[in-house]
Image (tube, rainbow, N blue to C red):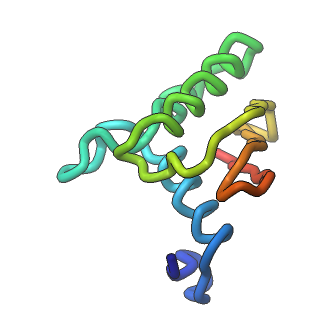
Amino acid sequence: MIGIDRDSGAKVDDWLQFVQRATRALTTPLGTRQKRPLYGSLIPTLLGQNLGDDVLLLAQSHATQAFYNKQNGIDDFQPQVIVASRQGAGLLLRFAGTWKNRQQTFEVVT
């Protein structure tokens, strides 16, 4: 699938295009899209809270839910490791898993 980078306008395909789709799905609050109310994740609801270990564990759980939500269109990646950590005033999510029979890793910052 070929797409356009939302920041630079450059053409992206394959893995970079998937990372953009995943980032968009993980950072969009669940229920905020008019025509696709099941699109998104619960991760944005955690922002603004004290990022204690309990909130980091919730973030990992919400990220896992987002990958198994068919409406997000990112179910072609099977996460094997999801690690949430603090970064500045936000949250850093690291993912490792299988995509098209290849081991891949990427990060999402919220």
Q: Residue furthest front?
A: 101
| Front-most of residues 48 and 52 | 52
Q: Position of residue 63 (x, y in %)?
A: 58, 33
| Front-most of residues 3 and 92 | 3
Residue at 18% over, 53% down? 35
Q: Tell me if residue 58 comes above or below residue 44 in the rendering.
A: above
42 left or right of 34 in image: right
| Front-most of residues 41 and 51 | 41
Answer whether residue 47 is visible to the viewer in this image. Answer: no
Q: Residue furthest top?
A: 54
97 left or right of 17 in image: right
Residue at 59% over, 88% down? 11
Image-quadrant location for residue 90? top right
2 left or right of 59 in image: left
82 left or right of 38 in image: right
Q: Tell me if residue 67 comes above or below residue 52 in the rendering.
A: below
Q: Residue furthest left?
A: 35
Residue at 57% over, 78% down? 5
| Front-most of residues 74 and 90 | 74
Q: How many labels were placed on the picture?
A: 0
Q: Quadrant of the C terminus?
A: top right
Answer whether residue 53 is visible to the viewer in this image. Answer: yes
Q: Position of residue 52 (x, y in %)?
A: 74, 15
Q: Residue furthest bottom?
A: 10
Residue at 25% over, 42% down? 37
Q: Tell me if residue 72 comes above or below residue 102 in the rendering.
A: above
